[in-house]
Image (cartoon, rainbow, N blue to C red):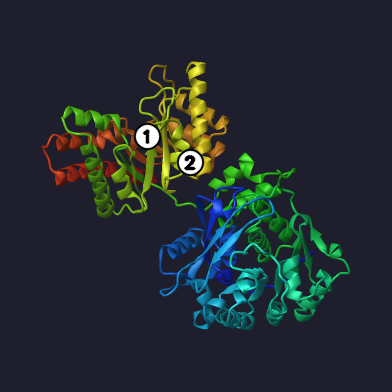
Amino acid sequence: MQNQTSFAPDRNLDVICLGRLAVDLYARQLGARLEDASSFAKYLGGSSANIAFGTARLGLKSAMLSRVGDEQMGRFLLETLEKEGCDISQVKTDPQRLTGVVLLGIKDRDTFPLLFYRENCADMALCEDDIDEVFIASSKSLLITGTHLSTEKVNAASRKALGFARQHNVRTVLDIDYRPVLWGLTGRGDGEQRFIADDAVSAHLQSVLPLFDLIVGTEEEFLIAGGKPALLDCLQVVRQLAPQAVLVVKRGPLGCAVITGEIPADINDAFTISGAQVEVMNVLGAGDAFLSGFLSAWLRGEDYASCCRRANACGALVVSRHGCSAAMPTPAELDYFLGLAVTPLRPAEDPTLARLHRVSVKRKQWDNLCVFAFDHRNQFFELARQNGVPESRISQLKTLLVQAVAQTEAASGLQGRTGILVDDRYGEDAMYAATGRGWWIGRPIELPGSNPLEFDHGRALAARLEIWPQEHIIKCLVQYHPDDEVGNRLEQEAQVRAVYQMAQLSGHELLLEVIPSRKLPQQPDTVLRALKRFYNLGIYPEWWKLESMSAEQWQDIDNLLEQRDPYCRGVVLLGLNAPVGELRKGFEQARGSRSCRGFMVGRTLFQEPSQRWLAGEIDDAGLIAAARHNFETLIDIWQAQRRQAQK
């Protein structure tokens, strides 16, 4: 079935989404009443915002038109949309209102309690003055959600936007998005109620139906739009009011129907593409994912079979996951899902899909990464012991090292290329001081010197990851040799696999530092075979941290990563307390590498200044100056090699 819709050419945007923009707080306890939930995960929410996010993730040029509060939750929403590539230039910051919040739960496969905190919230204060004609005219399409029409001010703003859209050949899309509680038809605590017939709501929706080119809704949502008891009668009402509109009826696991002309005698006679059969975790947000997938094909002129397949697949993926916006698929995972001969019943548990969902999203790019590593624990303890000072001095020292890194970043223009490795045994204050600066921050989890690998906090690691900021990266050093005695090797592999699985669950990136045991012979391909072994075990860390190698060995590593893990973030060079001259040689050998992204060096930089500071030979300023000198010297050497490689 062909898509006959024409779109204006040469527009800056594909779709503008006008409507709800709020924070979703999802209960993490599945099967619990909302009353019994004890922890929540925070996501971007609101139907229009979810679609803006979802379409941006699928490669459309989307924009959000709404309001947020001038506070932390508003900034979170803006940053989340912007990171996904969504235009936020027309999201106003409201100084008088708070951002809307929704509490959501997953009680069972049919019960999803919602509690809306939206009275006088920022996005419901959108007004006619917020609508810019030039901005509306810059898009191929404008999407509006029905619930946002429920108040006089927002209704007026929406109609003004629709008027500009009709004037400038902008295709208009209505997501009926019926929430009775937001129309004042239920008690505030009954947000999960999906349908209540109401003549006033039906009349209100019918007054705007003639303004839309594409109207999308569930069967229940078309019932409220049509205002009659039977679906086909309601579709007839919608068709009479919007004779040229394309109607898309979402039918859950049955798929969806597209009606471009007359309403058929039976809904099953409409053009229909069946849905994927998956096990439902959470239906909330599935409709937003559906529409994101549909628009990603519709706005590119693809036929309706393709629109529906993509829409159904997006909906199936999201209903199998926790949350709404963050559960939206990427193009890579959507293509993989659509290419499967057999649909997995639980897509979230499919390892390839889970990995693609994790690694193929838009991520901050790190290149020429300069990392000061002072996550050492035993070494700092020995320095303190040798100088006869209490361990508390180590915490002060590491906080000063953060100041040194910050001054280096500012002086050398290293924004977006700066990082630290820091522990939480002695470096907790330093870690807090570094968090939120936009740095690459890695935290060690291994028990220093352990072989086989043990974790510093034992079996409590998974629980500890729950309280880590998401920007922190798990760093795990393993003394792994592929020719090790079988029992020890298997124990090492089991521990690394456990770390990888915990990272998958927590959402943190993983840096795996591989240093082959010096008790075994070292061959030119030892490290290469170690990495191959981990890949064969299904372990795909975002980062590798490796020793200096020859240019030929780097070539082999590059080829391996390109073959086995094109989504790998890269490799960083470790220092092993090598003199600066040796590090220079290592940088030179790595300069032609396509996968080497930077260095992470510690004792070469901090050993001598720390010794002098702990001994009382230099003050705080002296420590900072000495650490800066060492760090900046190494940065200059690294950057010189990078420039040489570009010639």
- Above/below status of 104 relative to 596: below
Q: Residue at x 50, y 74 (%)?
A: 120
- Report the amino acid beneath label 1: Gln
Classify 10 Å Cα crowding around label 1: few (below 14), some (14-19), many (20 and above): some
Q: Amino acid at mark 2?
A: Glu
Q: Which residue is mark 2?
A: 542
Farthest-out residue, right: 265
Can you give x and y, in whole percent of width and height, for residue 87 in the image?
Answer: 50, 67
Q: Quadrant of the N terminus?
A: bottom right
Q: Position of residue 570 (x, y in %)?
A: 45, 41
To which residue does mark 1 refer?
A: 589
State which tag comes first along the sequence, 2 or 1. 2
Q: Nearer the viewer, residue 416 or 51?
A: 51
Whether residue 446 sits left or right of residue 23 in the image: it is left
**x and y percentages locating residue 612 in the rendered image:** 15, 35
Callout 1 secondary element: helix
* Residue 9 can be seen in this image: no
- Residue 32 seen anywhere in this rendered image of the structure: yes
For the point 68% across and 48% down, the residue is 337
Q: Residue at x 62, y 41 (%)?
A: 352
